[in-house]
Image (tube, grey):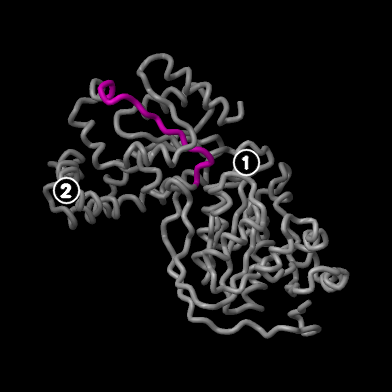
Amino acid sequence: MLFLNGKKHTKSTPESTSLSLKTINLMSKSNQYKTLTLVNHSSHKLIILGGTFDPFHNGHFSIIKAIKEYFPNSKILLIPTYQSPFKKESMLSARQRLLLLTKLSIIIPNLIIDPYEINKEKVSYSIDTIAYIKNKFPSFDLYFCMGEDAAQSFTKWKNFKSILGLTTLLIVPRTSSQSSRVLEKLTYPPQSVLLPMTKIDISSTEIKSKNRPFTKETFQKWFPETLIKEAKILLNTAPIIGLTGQVGTGKTEATTFLSKTFAIEIIDLDLIGHSILEETPTIKNLVSTFGATILDETNKISRTHLGKIVFSDKHKLVLLNKIVHPLILEKTLILLSKRDKPTIIVGSLLQEIGILDYCSKVVCITGKSDTIIKHIGEKKYNRRQFQQSEKTLLRNSDHTISNDYTKNFYSKLTELFNSLLGL
């Protein structure tokens, strides 16, 4: 047994390392969620911290800070657990939980986010996850975090001896006053490390409470400063639903119908994009990039002229997106922060703009090519080559509706959104 508070030591403190990390800036779901960091392996300590993180809060943050203090050169691996999408007590979707962890990784060096258990889409035993991690990081000394209560029942876990063969247990105290006594009571296992810390008295249950105070002070109590903006958006009880599909599938018709059928707010990414093109700073930036030929006779951006340029050259479309997409995201987040109703975000660029991971659910509208061409013409239909493929959109979606341009389409919309809105 090892105490890191100076009382009892049988191991040395962590050694230095030449491990290098490269943070991946892309967090969206593509087939499966991707591990957030690339690691060049070298011998070092890897601290495994699992949990639902629904949501991640300052209680979790206090554990990470304690690990950083006592294992200053270690890497921390967060493993968010799978939660059934039908679990009523779940607050955030998998993509929303991962969004918060992604934001966290920006301010914490050497933090790795691995969605292994989420991607399995079923409950995972700890031994299976640890075996996966050991295979992925074979040269690392693994430390497996667990709470006091779990430590006391550890010998009842599946293949607990195999876990001990792969890791050292790092026990997180329930309270600082009781921590030492718990380890002293443990008769098994001997290779346990106590993490000395002052635990913050915050629980996910408190945050999920219907009677929780929704104030600036409580958000400062609950969340690290870097997560407060996203937490305010995601913890709003009004759901955020993404509605996507390629050009011509009927997204506009669908949102018009839904806005008349349900008490909801609509955020149309195309309309936001159009409004941004009318702003003076954007006009100046685009003229500097593409030339004055994109202007009309009133010196405003002509979407027709601009479209001819970017839809004939993918490189120029990329340049346009680099200018406009961050502005669309910024305005969308402002609207989300002010919403007081269930909100549908509609657009074909949910992922590219960076709004996909804010959605609790995503619905993709599809349709047959010949039917779509009949409605919008072949010229507009050909713009699909500049959009994400339907296969990619479907992979990033939770539900699919095929638009046959009959009343049946609206019946399916009503049924699905009754369910998604909890009506």
In the drawing, what numbered circle is on residue 313? 2
Q: Quadrant of residue 220?
A: bottom right
64 lies left or right of 172: left
Residue at image location 56% in from the left, 25% down from the top: 418
Q: Secondary structure at mark 2?
A: loop
Badge 1 local density, few (<14 within 10 Å), some, or many (20+)?
some
Residue 185, can we see it?
A: yes
Image position of 396 (left or right of 280): right
**Closer to the camera, 90 or 326?**
90
For the record, the magenta segment spans 358-372
Asked if residue 232 can be seen in this view, the reply is no
Distance CA(mark 1)–CA(mark 2): 43 Å
- Residue 195's disc is none
At label 2, the amino acid type is Asp
Q: Residue at x 54, y 70 (%)?
A: 138
The image shows residue 6 at horizontal and vertical percentages of: 77, 85
**Which residue is depicted at the point 80% across and 83% down?**
8
Q: Is residue 20 magenta?
A: no
Q: Amino acid at mark 1?
A: Ser
Residue 84, which numbered label?
1
Image coords of residue 208 (percent x, y): 69, 46
